[in-house]
Image: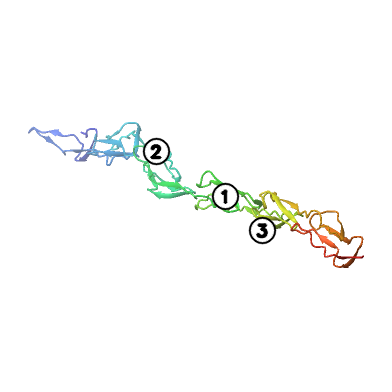
């Protein structure tokens, strides 16, 4: 006598029984009980469900949340050997792939499978505004949306200096503003660019410009000039010199950005006193009649010198000075 397949002897003798004259069996009674396989084997990425662990009991497997079914059978049976048959179910973790990019942010992650976490931080040149900085790989195979909001740093309008001019298209991080010397200023040294930095400030352009200096204004014999400064846009005022009269034109000259004074355009003409006065007792000799010309007087024939000066000068008022020569009749 022996136990059926899947059962083990739990007591009694496996010897033969004898049928007695009173119609009963004599001998030890053998007890059999079902084989018990214990807890079913675990499968990576799968959950199992079972109600018994004895012979021919069945454990059912299914892929856990965050795992996808690939192939194989999803059951295991308790066999007569006392072992569970191997379930051939294969489950692999959901892979969400590369996490979603966020404008203005950098991300760091080590895995892309279910429940992996990607961490975000605003990139250099971007400022954090609001939102959460993590994203999780979900059972759906999609990353949760990171709500991190980063905006690019804006440096605002570049600094403007009186001696320079600036050109720029944008004012955000890494934008470049180009400086040049303003009209009336000359380049001395330095770099002519400024960059918007991640701290929200423009770098120093380091451009050195010096104001144009036109030097001393032109001086003409017929004019006089007055000025206080000789740099760009300085104004020199001209006037006709003593002995010259205004004719036409403008009386100012301006220091230009090319380092030259503009032409004053002032026209002055020398004063002309005309013919010197002639007296009956004197004679006069002269070559010119313009300012500072000198006429020489002498006593006429029949007149003798008494006293005084014998010259007359053409003055800036257009009149000859009195000769002051005194002559008397010699008869």
Q: Is residue 186 left or right of residue 81?
A: right
Depth check, front residue: 134 or 307: 307
Depth check, front residue: 79 or 32: 79
Farthest left residue? 22
Q: Residues within 10 Å of mark 3 (few under 14, many from 20)?
A: some
Residue 194 marker: 1
x%, y% of residue 63? 32, 36
Q: Is residue 221 left or right of residue 162?
A: right
Give whichever of discs 1 and 3 has the lower sequence position. 1
Q: Residues within 10 Å of mark 1 (few under 14, many from 20)?
A: many
Residue 96 marker: 2
Look at the image and tell me whether residue 73 can be seen: yes
Q: How is colour applied across the structure in the image?
A: rainbow
- Given contact means CB atoms under 8 Å apart, are the residues at marks 2 and 3 in contact? no
Residue at image location 16% in from the left, 34% down from the top: 17
Depth check, front residue: 308 or 69: 308
Helix, strand, or loop for circle 2?
loop
Residue at image location 81% in from the left, 60% down from the top: 313
Q: Residue 113's quadrant in the figure?
A: top left
Helix, strand, or loop for circle 1?
strand
Residue 229 marker: 3
Look at the image and tell me whether residue 259 can be seen: no
Q: Residues within 10 Å of mark 2 (few under 14, many from 20)?
A: many
Disc 1 from disc 3: Cα separation:
32 Å
Residue 111 marker: none
Helix, strand, or loop for circle 3?
loop
């Amino acid at each position: 006598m022996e136990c059926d397949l899947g059962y083990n002897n739990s007591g009694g003798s496996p010897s033969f029984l004898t049928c007695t004259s009173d119609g009963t069996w004599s001998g030890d009674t053998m007890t059999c009980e079902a084989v018990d396989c214990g807890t079913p084997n675990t499968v990576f990425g799968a959950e199992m469900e079972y109600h018994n662990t004895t012979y021919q009991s069945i454990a059912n497997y299914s892929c856990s949340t965050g795992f996808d079914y690939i192939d194989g059978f999803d059951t295991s049976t308790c066999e007569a050997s006392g072992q569970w048959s191997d379930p051939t179910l294969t489950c692999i973790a959901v892979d969400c792939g590369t996490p979603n990019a966020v404008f203005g942010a950098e991300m760091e992650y080590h895995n892309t499978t279910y429940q992996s976490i990607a961490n975000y931080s605003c990139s250099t040149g971007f400022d954090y505004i609001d939102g959460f900085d993590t994203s999780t790989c979900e059972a759906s195979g999609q990353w949760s949306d990171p709500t991190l909001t980063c905006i690019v740093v804006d440096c605002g309008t570049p600094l403007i200096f009186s001696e320079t001019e600036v050109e720029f298209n944008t004012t955000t991080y890494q934008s470049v503003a180009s400086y040049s010397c303003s009209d009336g200023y000359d380049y001395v040294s330095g770099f002519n660019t400024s960059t918007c930095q991640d701290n929200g400030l423009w770098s120093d352009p380091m451009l050195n410009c010096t104001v144009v200096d036109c030097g001393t204004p032109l001086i003409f014999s017929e004019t006089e000039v007055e000025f206080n400064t000789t740099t760009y846009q300085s104004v020199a005022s001209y006037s006709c010199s003593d002995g010259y009269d205004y004719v036409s034109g403008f009386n100012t000259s301006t220091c230009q950005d090319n380092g030259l004074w503009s032409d004053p355009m002032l026209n002055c003409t020398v004063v002309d006193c005309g013919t010197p006065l002639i007296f009956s007792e004197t004679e006069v000799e002269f070559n010119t009649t313009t300012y500072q010309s000198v006429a020489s007087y002498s006593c006429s024939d029949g007149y003798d010198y008494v006293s005084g000066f014998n010259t007359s000068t053409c003055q800036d008022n257009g009149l000859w000075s009195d000769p002051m020569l005194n002559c008397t009749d010699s008869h």
